[in-house]
Image (cartoon, rainbow, N blue to C red):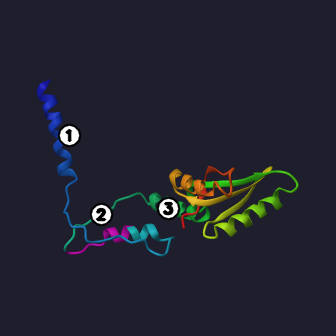
Amino acid sequence: MFSFVKLSFIIVVFFPLFVFSQENNIDTVITKPKVKENYFDQYINQIQTRKTTEGQVNIMQDNRIKSLMNKQIRIDDKNPGFAGYRVQIFFDSGSQARTKANEVKSKFLTLYPDVAAYLTYEQPFFKIRVGDFRNMLEAQGFKNVLSTDFSNAFIVSDKINGY
């Protein structure tokens, strides 16, 4: 029993060193090509390109992986953005809600012209959300800045623009 445990320990510790060892030459930087549709193909070709001073990478994969990657790229192009946070400064329903929302948006853009403002309608509310924040801390900092002009502001999770 003891020798089995010892042998298992040696295999677990030293086997990955032999399996995952490779030449330590990292001179090539993979850059994102400008053509999105062929991004996956270009990436694979760039990895497989062999130079005399570098090792060789052979990628063996099912053809369905390539089609799934291209499908995901098309989906991402149709639905840009990713999960993040915004600060909601207004929401209201009623007959004058749209007019009030546009007034609040104009006031905000006058005070903060460099920050994006988004007017949305989710029945029955018109909402004004501002900013594109990747984390809660950034959103909280901006909410604190807004607190003098928009005292009812609060942070919401939303799909944000990455640019």
Q: Amino acid at mark 1?
A: Val
- For image coordinates 57% across by 57% down, the residue present is 142
Up-down relation of residue 134 to residue 29 (above or below): above
Categorize mark 1 by other alpha carbons within 10 Å: few (<14), some (14-19), many (20+): few
Task: Name the mark on residue 124.
Answer: none
For marks 1 and 2, give the one nearer the viewer.
1
Q: Amino acid at mark 2?
A: Asn
Q: Does the magenta-highlighted stretch encompass residue 132?
A: no
- For image coordinates 17% across by 40% down, the residue present is 11
Q: CA distance from mark 3 to mark 2?
A: 19 Å
Q: Can you say which quadrant of the picture contains the C terminus? A: bottom right
Left or right, residue 79 beside residue 2: right
Residue closest to the eye, 124 or 40: 124
For marks 3 and 1, give the one nearer the viewer.
1
Q: Secondary structure at mark 3?
A: helix
Question: For residue 150, which quarter of the picture?
Answer: bottom right
* Residue bearing mark 1: 12
Q: Secondary structure at mark 1?
A: helix
* Residue bearing mark 3: 67
- For image coordinates 21% across by 51% down, the residue present is 19
Categorize mark 3 by other alpha carbons within 10 Å: few (<14), some (14-19), many (20+): few
Q: CA distance from mark 1 to mark 2?
A: 26 Å
Where's residue 147, x and y in %? Answer: 64, 54
* Residue bearing mark 2: 58
Residue closest to the eye, 130 or 10: 130
Span highlighted in magenta in the image: 44-52
Kindly give the residue lying farthest to the front in the view shown. Answer: 148
Where's residue 133, x and y in %? Answer: 55, 58
Kindly give the residue lying farthest to the right in the view shown. Answer: 95
Q: Does the magenta-highlighted stretch encompass residue 48?
A: yes
Q: Are marks 3 and 2 in contact (CB under 8 Å)?
A: no
Q: Give the mark nearest the N terminus, 3 or 1.
A: 1
